[in-house]
Amino acid sequence: MTLQFGYELKSALGQKCKLGIARFLKQTLTPALVLTLALPSFAPALAPALAVNSDLPPESMHVPLLATEKSVSTYVPSAAAEGQGIAVNVIYTGKARFKDGAPVAVVAPGGVGPDGLSFNMHAAQVGAVEVRFAFPGGGTPQFGTKGTFDNRGARSIEAFRDVLLFAGGRKNDYKGRSFEELMAPVIKVNPANLGIVGWDNGANIALVTMAKYGIDSKESSAQEAQPQDVIDFVKWLALYEAPVGSMFSPANLGSSSDLLRNKHYREGSAATGNLLIDYRKLKWKERAFRNPNKFSGKKRGLPGIKGVLFFDDNDNDIWEESREYAFNPALDTELTKQYFPPQVTAACQRLKVFGDEWPTNVATVAQTEEYFSERDGSLYIPQITSQFPKLLVSMFASAVDHNQQQLDHPHICFLYNLFLTNKVRWLRLNPDPCYMGAISGLSAFNFVNNKPNNPLDPSTLITQLEPEGIVPDYVCMQGMVAELVDRLKTRNLVYPITQPLAPYSSGAAEAKAEADAKHKAAIDAATKAEKLKESGESGAEIEEKPETKAQPKGNKGNTSAPTPKSPQKPLNGANKSGKKRN
């Protein structure tokens, strides 16, 4: 992890949660060091005292240049949406990665809301086209998907399937155009190299959709006519810090919005596939509120659903929020019932946490299992590896997760080892460093180099996570997409590699160099013109002056140049303030 004095660590498209980082430091460093590092962020008034006679170093985050991006929008007909269909937007640059067309990256948006049109991971910068969309109920009044949002349930899954069918060339848009026909005027695309980017919680709906609309290769033959709604053309998966599993979405081991981590979780157990929690202190307070006026509120200003499920560590039958961890429930679309993970709900039933009468606003074990069957992608990994036997999977994880708090990164170990156990064809944690070096312009040694298809051990996981503060997370995801599409294109799964399998440049660096050269030429021309003008004015002044002395024979007046100004003494590496740079 790279610590920057006075600066926050950045994540994809912005900065990672300051509170999450503070917790990470608190859990891993000494309190004195935490205080020293936290003062510039939490007490700006005291920062000057810590930096007497020294300038703060420049921010170390390196953001690569971006080529100009453009987009094309359309609607894809779907029974899941009202009106013209699913709102789809496709981002591209002027240069495809391959001669036969740009690969296709369909983004399953993160978060829990319906909108995916405002998100951009800049996959177009590596020569792909990025397909984004809005679930029913998402988008804007000007451009969005009409319908009712079902918290990423059956309608959302159907909508995502229809977007994939369109991007894969199996379905036309509302004007009868195929994906290739829509994009032909601006860039050539190749749906044969199509994959899904599951960003954060988007990984869950990506996996559920693949399982529901894939087809088992062992039970079908090439001669059989496949149903029109089959998405067997998905070739790769790129997952960003994916909270796959009912215990991770919503986060129930500790998230960036929680004051505490769930200390009753047995660290390291998730990597085995059997996540262990000691539920003996579990208590229910029916009149308490969890996160009032936030996600659980029906309207702004109203409290959420009553009832808090927590660990009563001090056995006083009172929920002390700053000391005792409480579970985060998912909510139904009517916001009338709390859905705790099936594992947690089963523990409540087993330990009779609710007494003799089950609360009406808490889902039963059967109800939670049905709810998460549409929202927990981990349930379908065995099915997916069977339906997609040639699937390539890559997962991104950094030293400080954008949401999950547990230090062993249980969601990463759980999903990675689950894929491995079910014999996915190719699996890798974090992109190859040679791709990261090529995209970022930095040395490849700044990035981790993990061997594919190797199991993860929580005790050594920190050495396999991407460091913080070098590049934004979306740049790592660009490297991941580039590696996946290249390996598919070249049919090369060799490890290690020393350079990208299909070298590519977006042209952003060349365009900047050309612009800088033009700018410098313009400045040089202006400076030269200014000098010529000054020289002409000086000559005119000299000609107007009367001669005061006889000139030596052979001279035609005073031809000596004006006395130049004394050159300033070099600053010897000093900055404008006169202080030497560190």
Image (tube, rainbow, N blue to C red):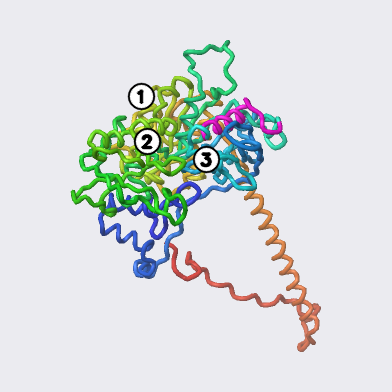
Residue under numbered circle 1: 421
| Of residues 87 and 235, the one drawn nearer to the viewer in this rendering | 87
Residue 106 in view: yes
* Residue found 57% across the figure and 48% down from its top: 65
Distance CA(mark 3)–CA(mark 1) = 35 Å
Q: Locate residue 437, reporting x and y percent.
A: 49, 41
Q: Secondary structure at mark 2?
A: loop
* Residue found 23% across the figure and 52% down from its top: 318
Residue 484 located left or right of residue 563: left
Q: Nearer the viewer, mark 3 or mark 1?
A: 3
Disc 3 residue type? Phe
Residue under numbered circle 3: 149
Residue under numbered circle 2: 246
Q: Secondary structure at mark 1?
A: helix
Q: Earlier in the sequence, mark 2 or mark 3?
A: 3
Quadrant position of residue 83: top right
Q: Earlier in the sequence, mark 2 or mark 1?
A: 2
Q: Locate residue 122, reporting x and y percent.
A: 56, 43
What secondary structure prevails in the magenta region? helix
The stretch in magenta equals: 156-175
Residue 561 located left or right of residue 129: right
Q: Locate residue 296, reporting x and y percent.
A: 41, 48
